[in-house]
Image: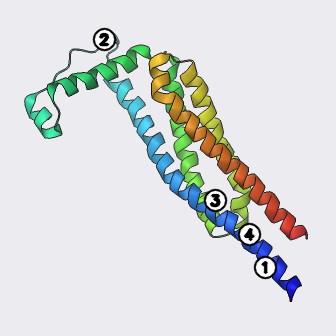
Amino acid sequence: MADTMQPMAGNARGAAWRSWLGIVAIVLGVLLVAVHGTEWTRQHVFAIAAPASGELPPAECPEDELIEEGLSVAECEQLVSNVRSYLVSAPEWFPGLMTALSAFGTILAFVSIVVGAGLVDHRAWAATVAVPVFGGLALIDAVAFIGAINAGPILRGLYLWNHLQWFVVHMMMTVGAVAGRAASTAEITR
C-alpha cells in the first residue's frame, strides 16, 4: 500500500509545480502583453508625433480639453515637457530597439499565456516549451536593460528598474520551469 502511495505523491508534486507555474505565467503574461503593447504604442505615437526637427511646439492646452481630461494648465504643460524630455534624450537607435523588443515581447507574452494554460492542464509539451519561452522573455528584458543603460539618465530613470524587475521575474520562472521539468523527469525514471 505504501509503495502505491509514494508515486502518487510524487506525481502530485509534479502536477502542483506545473499548475502554479502555469497560473503565474497566465497572470504575468496578460500583464506583460499590456506592458509591451503600451510601449509599442508609445514608440509609434512618438515616431508619428515628433516633428522632423525634433523641436516640439509650445504646449497647446485648450480649456475644453483640460476640463474633459480633468487636467490643469500646469499638468498639461508638464505632459508636453515629459514628451519633449523623452524625445531629446532618446538616441537615434533607442526607439527602433524598443519597438522591436516590444513587438517580440508581445508575441512571447501571448505564447507564455498559452504555455501557462498548457501547464495548468498538465500538457507535456508545455513543460518543454516553458523553458525557451520564459528564457526568451528574460533575454528580451536583458537586452532592454542594456539598451536603457546606454540611453542616458532620463531614459534610465524611465526604463531601468522596470526591465530589471521583469528580468528577475522571468529568470525565476525559467529556473522554476527547469527545476520542475527535472523533478518530473526524475519521478518518471523512478
Residue in the picture at 84% in, 68% down? 187
Residue 170 visible in this rendered orientation of the protein: yes
Residue 134: horizontal and vertical position, in percent? 65, 47
Quadrant for the C terminus in the image: bottom right
Marks 3 and 2, Cα distance to the nearest angstrom?
Answer: 47 Å
Distance between mark 2 and mark 4 Cα atoms: 59 Å
Instruction: Please say if the residues under marks 1 and 3 sit with CB atoms less than 8 Å apart.
Output: no
Instruction: Assess whether mark 4 and mark 2 are in contact (beta carbons under 8 angstroms).
Output: no
Q: Nearer the viewer, residue 8 or 55?
A: 8
Distance between the Cα atoms at labels 3 and 4? 12 Å
Q: Are marks 2 and 1 in contact (CB under 8 Å)?
A: no
* Label 4: which secondary element: helix
Q: Which residue is mark 4?
A: 13
Task: Quickly name the residue at label 3.
Answer: 21
Residue at image coords 11%, 27%? 62
Position of residue 60 measured from the top left corner of the image (x, y, whole percent): 16, 22
Image x and y of residue 68, in percent: 13, 39
Place residue 22 in its image quadrant: bottom right
Q: Which residue is mark 1?
A: 8
Sort mark 4 into few (<14), some (14-19) or many (20+) by Cα contacts within 10 Å: some
Front position among marks 2 and 1: 1
SS under mark 1: helix
Badge 3 vs badge 4, beta-carbon distance below 8 Å: no
The tag on residue 55 is: 2
Which residue is most to the front? Answer: 2
Q: Reading the chain from its start, which is encountered first: label 2 or label 1?
A: 1
Farthest residue in the left direction? Answer: 64
What secondary structure is marked by label 3? helix
The answer to which of marks 3 and 2 sits earlier in the sequence is: 3
